[in-house]
Each structure stands twice: as C-alpha cells, then as structure tokens.
Amino acid sequence: MILLRKRWMFTAVGAVVGGALAYFLKDEENRQQVADKTRDIQGKFTKKDDLPIEEAGNPQVSNLENADMVAEGSQFGVQYYNELTEKEREILEKSNS
C-alpha cells in the first residue's frame, strides 16, 4: 500500500510541476529568458579553445625538441603558461578598477 501511495504522490507532484512549467512557458518572453539562461549555463561548462599555448601537455611529434623536454619532465611550458595567465589576470584587474 505504501509503495502505491508513493507512486501516486510522485505522479501528482510531477503533474503539478509540469502544469506550472507549461503555464510559465506559454509566454514568449519567459521562454526566451529560459533559453538565454540555458545558453549562459551551457557556455560556462563548454571547453574553451582560446588558450594561448596550443601544445601545452600535448606536444606534436613534428616538434621533437618540445616532445623530448616534456618527456624528460620539463616544467618550462607550465611556468610560461602560469606567468602568462598571471599577466592576463593583472591586466584584467587593472582594467576593471
């Protein structure tokens, strides 16, 4: 009996939520707001390909010197990337203040 009651309760809650959502989304402006928010949230989680160093951590075979340095454990690329991002952060902070 308890399982049957839970099933009906979940069905009722789902129907109420679905009805409220349908009522809210019947207006074009509300649908546009939801679509914009969804794109904003999705944009935060998508991979950005605008990194300044394209070969960091994945050297190409055609560049053997870089591949050898990475294979030997060189940290030059990591240090360079960290310094570059620090400079970018400082520039952004100066422009925002």
Image (cartoon, rainbow, N blue to C red):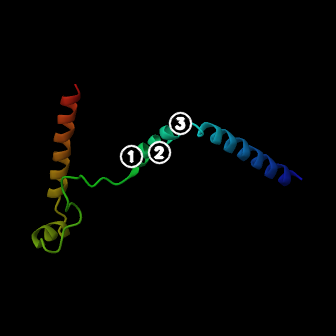
3 or 2: tag closer to the N-terminus: 3
- The residue that appears at 64% across and 42% down in the rendered structure is 22
Q: Quadrant of the C terminus?
A: top left
For the residues marked 1 and 2, what is the alpha-carbon distance in whole angstroms? 10 Å
Label number found at residue 30 = 3
- The quadrant in which residue 15 appears is top right
- The residue that appears at 48% across and 44% down in the rendered structure is 35
**In this picture, residue 88 sits left or right of residue 33:** left
| Residue type highlighted by circle 3 | Asn
| Residue type highlighted by circle 1 | Lys
The residue that label 1 is drawn on is 44
Label number found at residue 38 = 2
- The residue that appears at 16% across and 62% down in the rendered structure is 74
Residue 69 location, x and y as percent?
14, 67
Q: Under tag 3, what secondary structure?
A: helix
* 46 and 27: which is toward the camera: 27
Q: Of the residues tagged 1 and 3, which is closer to the observer?
A: 3
Label number found at residue 11 = none
Q: Residue furthest left?
A: 65
Residue 39 location, x and y as percent?
43, 46
